[in-house]
Amino acid sequence: MRDDGRVQSEEAATTVPAKGTTALLAVAGILTGVAGLVTAQATVWLLQAPNGPVYAVASAVRDFTPGPIANFLVHDLIKNNTVETTALRVGTIAILLGICAWIGAQTTKRPLLPPVAYVVLALLGLGAVHRLPDSTSGSTLGLLVGLVTLIVVHRVLTGAVLQESSGPVGRRSFLVRAGVVAVLAAGAGIAGDLSRRRVEKVEKERRLLRLPIRRGTPPEGTSLGVEGIAPWRTPSGEFYTIATTLSPPVIAQEEWSLRIHGMVDRELTLTYEDLAKRSFTEDWVTLACVSNEVGGDLIGNAFWSGVLVRELLAEAGVDPDADAVLQTSHDGWTCGTPLVALTDDRNSLLALGMNGKPLPIEHGYPVRMVVPGLYGFVSATKWLVDLEVSRFDKFDAYWTERGWAEQCDIRTQSRIDVPARDGEVAAGTLKIGGVAWAQHLGIERVEYQLDGGAWKPAELGRATESLDTWVQWAASVEVAAGEHTVLVRATDKNGYTQTSELRDVIPDGATGWDEVTFTAS
Ligand SMILES: Nc1nc2c(c(=O)[nH]1)N[C@H]1C(S)=C(S)[C@@H](COP(=O)(O)O)O[C@H]1N2
Ligand SMILES: [Mo]
């Protein structure tokens, strides 16, 4: 046996954590948890996604707390049953940080536990987020950023703590690292918070706006009253959204203006006030995305209010050699629209209102273009700031550069909404139906085919006078028990009947008949 005190104490340092190490590891765990929560929440705010992790977990805690306890907490103790309750949120954060402290403290004994535990926490968060109906990919991305933060910060901080046991160098390094983490997390938090405040400010301004717009009443007969068919008016909150930006630009009214220039006699610059003062036009228009697969839901019908584009172009005085308008959005997205579609009788409009409200931010606030009959990618610029009258041979727009068509009318299409795909129904008499569209041309007829039988005409709902909207279709069929297949095809007022040829969405829209298989019992 050696009797060398120095060696002994060094051995002791590597096997038994120095006094206070476990506590410091717990502190590192808490700091790690704070950093993870902050970056996750900041990401959600920056992406303008709903349901940050704390909100989501607090909701789950509220909903999964056993009845009597929840009753006691909600009714007797907190006296409020919303997740906005500070007590619920603070409680949730406290529990999460408690778990993080424990995870941190486990680092020396079970080095594999922390990463596994963080993944488990992130998965629980993911579950909590996705049980809320309005979560988006931004909500998920927030959790991913949070998870990466947890794993990285954990390594950085606990690494320093474990050095700590070997002397004052380690302690200083822990303090330095903790400081850096705190500063970075605070920076992320501040950036997220600024973004949140900005959204709140613009949302408030939006809410307080009073525009001369109406909500629009769907004309009589547009709705066939069949359950399961998409409502004739798509509520704004359920309207599909497509954008190339990670988060929609948040533009205050006073920051916005629209420049009309290029092959014109007079350049125009219009502010939001300029537009809001003009006389408004309004109509129902069904927007559709070229990426909509047969049977897909990248289509919606809304009541749009705004200013006729052709009047503005007339004021600018368009060069007769021009054949296109290059539209640019605040976020730099571009599309090229045939000049004629903006100047003919189809009432293309600079929309300020959607379903009676100022445009939602994600649908283009303050101003977007709406062109009946053209796919969104060649016409429906959201957050529109620039219209350059030009020629198609002088530019390539965003999607055209990426292999999509330069010009593109919406294809005549139809979709089956009921019965649901692979759905189960009761045998006997069954209502089937859906929607069909040929914007600006109009739908002449919709036919369906059941189990390979004859094509039969469906009942059609009414369209508006402008024919810029979809129509509902429906039929009653008799089905015996067993598996069935229904097909649908539409014919437009030009006499074109949808081809059965299945073609992919790129470069100019999908073709083919929608088909639904279902089981009757
Ligand atoms: N600024 C901008 N505007 C845009 C797009 C975009 O990516 N950025 N996408 C277009 C496409 S492809 C479609 S289908 C419509 C969708 O409009 P919505 O999101 O209001 O449904 O917006 C169009 N306007
Ligand atoms: Mo689109």
Image (spheres, rainbow, N blue to C red):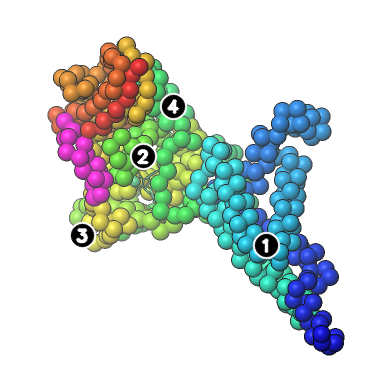
The tag earlier along the polypeptide, 4 or 2, is 4
For the record, the magenta segment spans 497-512
Q: SS of the residue at dot 3?
A: helix
- Confirm whether residue 307 shows in the render: yes
Q: Is residue 507 magenta?
A: yes
| Closer-to-camera residue (128/398) | 128
Do the numbered discs 2 and 3 sit on residues whose CB atoms are within 8 Å? no
Q: Which residue is mark 1?
A: 110
Q: Is residue 165 left or right of residue 462?
A: right
Asked if the beta carbon under badge 1 is closer than 8 A to the nearest atom of ligand 1, the reply is no
| Image point (54%, 48%), residue name | 139
Q: Position of residue 120 (x, y in %)?
A: 60, 51
Q: Secondary structure at mark 2?
A: loop
Q: Is residue 199 left or right of residue 25?
A: left
Q: Residue type at mark 1?
A: Arg
Indicate whether residue 410 is drawn in magenta: no
Other residues around mark 2 within 10 Å, as few (<14) / some (14–19) / many (≥20): some
Q: Quadrant of the N terminus?
A: bottom right
**Alpha carbons under labels 3 and 4: distance apart:** 39 Å
Query: What amino acid type should be assigned to the residue bearing mark 4?
Result: Gly
Q: Nearer the viewer, mark 4 or mark 2?
A: 2
**Residue under label 3:** 393
Instruction: Indicate if the residue with disc 2 has its beta carbon within 8 Å of ligand 1.
Output: yes
Q: Quick check: 362 left or right of 115?
A: left
Mark 4 or 1: in front is 1
Question: For mark 2, what is the residue?
Answer: 298
How far apart in space, not on screen, are marks 4 and 1 (Cα)? 63 Å
Q: CA distance from mark 3 to mark 1?
A: 66 Å
Position in image of residue 310 (x %, y %): 31, 43
- Name the main secondary structure of what is drawn in magenta: loop
Q: Residue 75's image quarter?
A: top right
Q: Nearer the viewer, residue 106 or 356?
A: 106
